[in-house]
Image (cartoon, coloured by chain):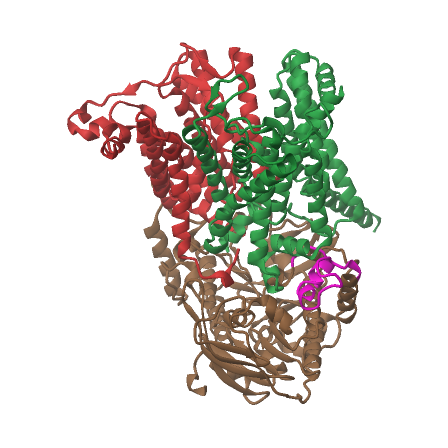
Amino acid sequence: MPNNEKRKLFNFFPKKLSADLEKKDKRNILIFKYTTSLILFVVAGALLVWMQDESPIEAVKGIWKGSFGSLTAFGNTLRWAAPSILTGAAAIVAFKAGVNNLGIEGQVAIGGFVAGILGVFFEFPPVVHILFILICATLSGLLWSVIPAILRLFFKVDEFITTMMMNYVANYLTQYLVQQVLAGGLDNWGYVNMASTPTINGSAYLPDFIPDTTATLAVPVAFLISFAIAFLYRYTVEGYELKQVGENLKFAKAGGVKVVQQYLIIFLLSGAIAGLCGGIEVLGTYHKFNNGFAANMGWEGISIARIAELNPVGLIFVGFIWGVLKAGSMQMERMVGVNRLTVQIVEYMFVLFISIDYEGIYMRHKDRKNKKAYLESHKEASNNA
Amino acid sequence: MGNSEYILEMRNIRKTFGELVANDNVNLKVRKGTVHSIIGENGAGKSTLMNILTDIHKADSGDILLNGEKVHFKNSLDAARRGIGMIYQEFMLYRDLSVFDNIILGFEKKKWGFIIDRKACRKEIERICSEYSFNIPLDAIVKDLSVAMLQQVEIVKVLYRGADIIIMDEPTSVLTPQGIQGLFRAIRNLVGMGKTIIFISHKLKEVLEISDYITIMNHGRVVAEVLPNEVDEAKLASLMVGRDVILQANKVEPKIGDVLLSVKGLTVKDKDEIVRVKNVDFEIHSGEILGIAGVAGSGQQWIVEALFGLRRPEHGSQIIFDGKDITYVSPREHRLDGIGYVPQDRMGSGVNAKSSLWENSIMGYHIAHGFKNKYLVDTKQANEFTDEIVEQFDVRRQANKDKVAALSGGNIQKMVVGREFLQRNKLLIIEDPTRGIDVGAIEFIWQKIIDLAQEGVAVLLISHELNEVMQLSDTIKVIYNGQLYDGGRHGELTEEEIGLIMLGGNADAK
Amino acid sequence: MLKEILRLAFSVSTFASTFRLACPLLFGSMGGCYNSASGCANLSYEAVMLYSCFFSVLGSYISGSPWVGLLFGMGIGIFISIIFGTMSLVFHSNMIIAAIALNSTAWAVTTLLMVIIFGVRGTVYNERIVSFKPVHFKWMENLGIFNKIFNDNVILVYIAFCLVIIAYIVMYHTPFGLRIRGIGQNEKAAQTAGVDVNKYRWISLILMGAFTGISGTFLTLSGISMFVENMPAGKGFLTMISITIGRFNPLLIFLICLLFGYSQALVLVLGTLSLPTQIIAMIPYVAVIIVLFIDGLKKFKGVADIEV
């Protein structure tokens, strides 16, 4: 029971003050939420830029140019959007079902590492090679999440800690394998690079989505996966059961859902998507596995999933904006002297603002208004009497 | 100062939660040294009123007078300091702390300014225990104690805090008839020592027995104030509900068929390896209602969990359903075999409050009956089934996509019961089907259970309400300390006799 | 080789550095255990630690005194925890998300400030940054190994050890600790006992900020006198993890912190033998998982009994 209560704190479903919200209220809350967050976001961003003695408008221009200014820029935007969407998808699958998978980072790293290795040591015809690697990367991400899943299910060890531990293990393990076993790879200039695997074979390069840009097939894959998740949760029996397992496990169990299996599926699916993301990043962008390339990707995915309110379609939108900001921030740094870290700060400030429980604030406000109205009408009535 | 005839007076209390008016200009006057009962259906506003008194909720308007003096509580600590103590229906205890820590928390005596003076606290508690003759193990961990013991802990806790007015919210709902008598003795003892008790209940018989004054609430308003010798149960009930009700099941002659479920040597251990159910045997025939009565925590929960596949019974247990061994199969297969389950823990196992009505309605149905396409949810079919439940079981709702959390407790229970009853199951395991719902809904659900049995469905009814088991069951069993005792056929034994078995006083009755 | 490893693993210097390396975790976890015990899922240790690393360096740089650095570190720690508290307790935002946002901004903000104030990226090193000086106790000198392990540390190390005892007393022998534990187990009950739940949450949160601030200060001003980008590198998470594994019991947490400290010390000493340090660095994490697994083994009762 105390464990149960503790878990409520990790709950992603905001506390409902009044359960029967009217449609109008829901719309108002949505507007209230996003306008407030956006205003705070813009003000904070402007302030930060202004503190660096630059014009905020110029900075925004820089971002625009870097993200939509040319086809290359747009390709960059999509390139950055893809991993954001994929990690976000991994987070959505897990958190929608109440699994606190904080180990996305480790699963991405493992997926990336496997892709890097298979890209170097195997040579297949292009399409086959890519498919082979991506499947293996997906599987490795999946396997990486098996340990916390089993610990959670059979031994009641909170996945919240084990997944995080597995991040460290993944990080050190890949580092060890790259540095001590492979002894590094050659970088683009022919020097030994201890921190990465050798460059993968050309047959494993992910083809471009928009020719001559950095946007690879990762983009449509990311989109497809979000749509698949949306479909799963909206229309399928499987999705229905997953949702019930996530929201109330006891209920699902009493209802005859195979909770163990479903819970495992959630865990593994989340890990698999993260692993796929790692594989795609390596094949599409870096063409080799770099130590620590997955750093912060997990946190980012969770944040994005949260902004999208765990809605897979919203995820695409938020992931795209994330891509815009990332691609744009580099251009902005070059054009105006604003450090690109500014963008990161502002991004996460937005996350912070959006995490506020606007519904609660709105309902409390409405409650107070009703009460005041009653008291006033009451006063009038007694005055009249 | 002022009129001190009343130790407590509440004037024109109003409290709203969103659109809901929980208390509408409620007035209450309580005399010192009396037992003052407040009765009403669930949702009549009793608990809200008491929460305002203890300052858990702030009233929108209205005054509270203590000894004729107007008071303003800043927080619940303030209320406690003024001598108002409350014993909640769900005990306000910390499971992993010791009884001692539970009692002193918030009111610790200190030495050297910051260290808890355990010795002084213990002395004080022991004084209270001997003065009011309570006997509680101070060093035990709360989660290891029985419910009756926890209630004593609660009373001692309130006394330790120096309460003069003790509010008891449905204190008898978890006790046996004998436990209730014990509680009443304690109450009389307390009143004799000059304490004032506010007794909240919806069990009319008890109220009539213990009270000096009775206040009746309905829909957030006080509808009447009476003395116990002025009224009888029927009169109270009609005041409470606003119409005449007699809680009497329309029991008809059962049509008992073949044995449907037979349980042999069922032994269940909980997760701490403690044996909760010992070697239980029973049989249910189709068309029969088998009721299991017992004090809460006697092992009912584990029997049900084992029967429905939620918990693995120990070796040597055997559960045969319809000629098939189902001892170790999953709940899913129970569903497929045609076993329905109405859990006691309504908001936990019964529904998923975060989901919509239709999503809740098809749980279990989607396995036992399925949809046209095996993999896709057929929204139309789901809605049809939901509508069927809504119509047949009179669930008040606006739309099928409403969140279940928006429904009232009674409506949720009707939905859960409807979901299980309408799936054409062969066996129904029903746990506390009427817990915490109003009289009208109880009548309704009772009738439905009897109708089902008439159609040839076997029903296993497990309830903490002895009355419910006695009214509905064809065969009565009593569980005590994990073992099952015979309670006779319908109407064979009296309430007192069964109550005695519930307490283990008649172990040879097996 | 094995002999060499064992010799190093149990050498005096390894133990000496164990205590030094455990210190940053100790401060944070002794201050933060109340926060966790009150039922707050606070992941923001990493952010608090990173900010305080930077600001303690800044304080020392401005004033030339490590004590001012310490004040700065604690101050910013409290400030960040207040931001977290405002978000989670006042605005009821999701704690995990708020903490993730804080953690992710911390790196960017400190790096940005580093660029703005010191005009460098990567590492801030300046002779005006002064560390705490090691304290020498005369009376310890003839205590042999004990002397080698414990003597000549900065004052903060000794404070950390005292803190464990103080934290234990506060947790189990004062009304504050009792109430905090009560709140964590049953918030409603604590409320009915007249405990101002929010007040206690705030106090515990501020304690967490202040003491994690000391952790950050310890990282920068216990000898190396510099600030490196993303300096805690996961020590904040480790702090939080040791609290959770130690189940809010300061003595248990102390042991867990020592375990982490020891493994970090091993990484340092065995690194000289050109052993794969990554594997050694991995040990504590794997060890934690194994400990949790063994702990959970008791609860194993077959597949049918899953209660998540």
Q: Which chain is brown?
A: B
Percent x, y for residue B252? 69, 87
Side (left or right) of A342 relative to A316:
left
Q: Residue at x 45, y 54 (%)?
A: A155
Q: How many marks?
A: 0
Magenta: predominant secondary structure element?
Answer: loop
Nearest to the observer: residue B241 or residue B361: B361
B19 over C227 or under it: above or below: below
In the image, residue B348 above or below residue A113: below
Q: Position of residue C274 (x, y in %)?
A: 33, 26
Q: Does residue C152 appear to the left or right of C201 in the view shown? A: left
State yes or no: residue C119 in magenta. Answer: no
> Chain C, which colour?
red
Q: Residue at x 53, y 53 (%)?
A: A4
Whether residue C75 is visible here, answered yes or no, is no
Q: Nearer the viewer, residue A121 or B323?
A: A121
Q: Which residue is at 68% across, 12% downward?
A: A335
Q: Is residue A29 left or right of residue C31?
A: right
Seen from the viewer's position, the closer of residues C278 and B118 is C278
Q: Position of residue A133 (x, y in %)?
A: 58, 38
Which segment did they paint magenta? B352-380
Most extreme residue toward the right, as rendered?
A384
Q: Which chain is green?
A: A
The image quadrant that residue A67 belongs to is top right
In terms of image quadrants, where is residue A115? top right
Residue A320 shows up from this direction: yes
